[in-house]
Amino acid sequence: MERFDVVVIGGGVGGLTLALRLAKSDIKVLVLEKVKNPGKIYKGELLQPKSIENFHEMGISEEVMEKSLALPIIHTYEMTEDKDGQLFESMYIPLRYDMLPSKFAQARMIPHETLKTIILEEAKKYDSFHYWNPATFQTFTKMDEKKAQFDRALIKYGDEDREIQGTFFVGAEGRSSIVRKAMKQQVVTTQYNHHFLTVTFPRPESYTEARMFASHREFIGLFPLPDNEIRCVMLIKPGSYNKMKKEGLHTFYEPFARFEPELEPYVQQIESWKKIQLMIPIRHNIHTYVKGNAAIIGDAAHTVHPMAGEGMNLAIQDGAILGDLLCWMYSTGNLDKKHLKQFEKVRKKRADRISNLSHMSALGYAWPFKWYQWGRKFALKRFERHPILHYKHMLNISGVGWWPYSLYDAFRFIGPSNMYRKKHFETRSKKVIFDETDDYPWRNE
Ligand SMILES: Cc1cc2nc3c(=O)[nH]c(=O)nc-3n(C[C@H](O)[C@H](O)[C@H](O)COP(=O)(O)OP(=O)(O)OC[C@H]3O[C@@H](n4cnc5c(N)ncnc54)[C@H](O)[C@@H]3O)c2cc1C
């Protein structure tokens, strides 16, 4: 029976990032991926600065930069209807990644499968990397529940059943994680009062900036990809997907005529509803990410609302940090499974905060009332005009650091924007950046 140091179930972005980190340190890692050709399923494409920093540490940031498109600013527009129902811009807010003190002070758009291919091809350069595809993890065949010790697993590899042994098992298999179930972890689920439609279509060559448009009842996000494509997300009411399908594709094109007429001829190139994907947002909170010699990462450990573009990034950052911990365990001979808990210690708090932040961003667009839009505009304006509030928001979503929200923020929110001490801002804004000790505390042991 073949034995591996680490068995990673799921070859999504999270599993592959982890495996690359391990393979680079000569740890015998097996990735199991059940889908042979993923086809055109839309998943995350927006990379936050911290994820790019992680790829930089793994030596693949150059290729990621080459195959992605930079978004230093996300332009957000609040639109108001005049008495004839015509929309006009009533507020503009730039969300500025370029204010961050990161080497990569920008978000980047990259097709999901392109990113996975970059990581996979890099990992394949190492002899210690093993990739079984199509291979489905079925169940653990030898485990001791009391000791939380998982030893063997049954895999369907092509048409064959194979049993394998692993020192550590990592569930990176997305929302319906088998490893999480084996760890007997409860999931707390939050559902939302809205759904999204999402699709990629061609764009004009010059349309290279990300824009989000919201009226009191609609929301569209437009995120340019390389190769003259653009990814669109459109908020809809639950149930309206089937209604729109019955009425025809013009119901999908129509908001573009009002929000972004420049893209109207391009969106009309979508010829079938089959190209448009319904996305039902969901949030999962899980109490524990580690049990014995098993851990869960990415969507298996925390599914977040997509409004802030964080799910894929949490998976990448989990993979990078768990990878570093396992490398440290192997290089120092500290193979006791108790050390795995350090992964949870670093990541759970961060993932919970980002999950809350994504949830709050979603709530901002949850109700289609004029007074609700008025409240959102008020909040956005306050956030943008106060340097500390704007910086905090961008820093926190970027993953590069965390500056906690405090009671002072309530005063900043209502008070004048020049009421802050520049010196305090400059010192504090540097202290809240994650450094090596925050990300990889075991390295100092
Ligand atoms: C439409 C859409 C848009 C999104 N937009 C964004 C965005 O802009 N930014 C962002 O950060 N996030 C976004 N997300 C979220 C993001 O895609 C996910 O959070 C991210 O893909 C999670 O990565 P993962 O590696 O944990 O899981 P996944 O990407 O789900 O990968 C899990 C892998 O495990 C495999 N697998 C499952 N079960 C088994 C098994 N038993 N055996 C073997 N293999 C198995 C699956 O085939 C899959 O390949 C979006 C998601 C969707 C659906």
Image (cartoon, helix red, strand yellow):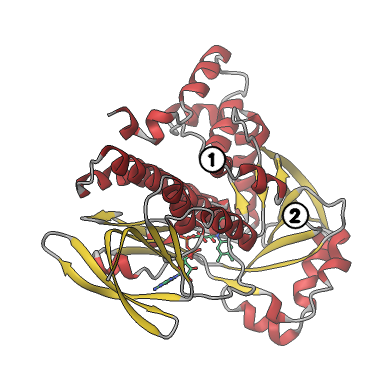
Say which mark, if any, is on residue 224. Answer: 2
- Mark 2, Cα crowd under 10 Å, few <14 / some 14-19 / many 20+, is many
- How far is disc 1 from disc 2 in space, using C-alphas? 20 Å
Q: Position of residue 367 (x, y in %)?
A: 57, 60
Q: Position of residue 86 (x, y in %)?
A: 84, 60
Examine the rendering and report whether any part of residue 76 can be seen.
Answer: no
- The earlier-in-sequence mark between 1 and 2 is 1
Q: Horizontally, is 51 left or right of 108 in the view?
A: left
- Mark 1, Cα crowd under 10 Å, few <14 / some 14-19 / many 20+, is many
Instruction: Please name the amino acid that badge 1 sits on.
Output: Lys
Secondary structure found at label 1: helix
Q: Horizontally, is 118 left or right of 316 in the view?
A: right
Say which mark, if any, is on residue 50. Answer: 1
Q: Horizontally, is 260 left or right of 335 in the view?
A: right
Quadrant for residue 3, please give it.
bottom left
Work out which quarter of the rendered image holds the C terminus and state it: top left
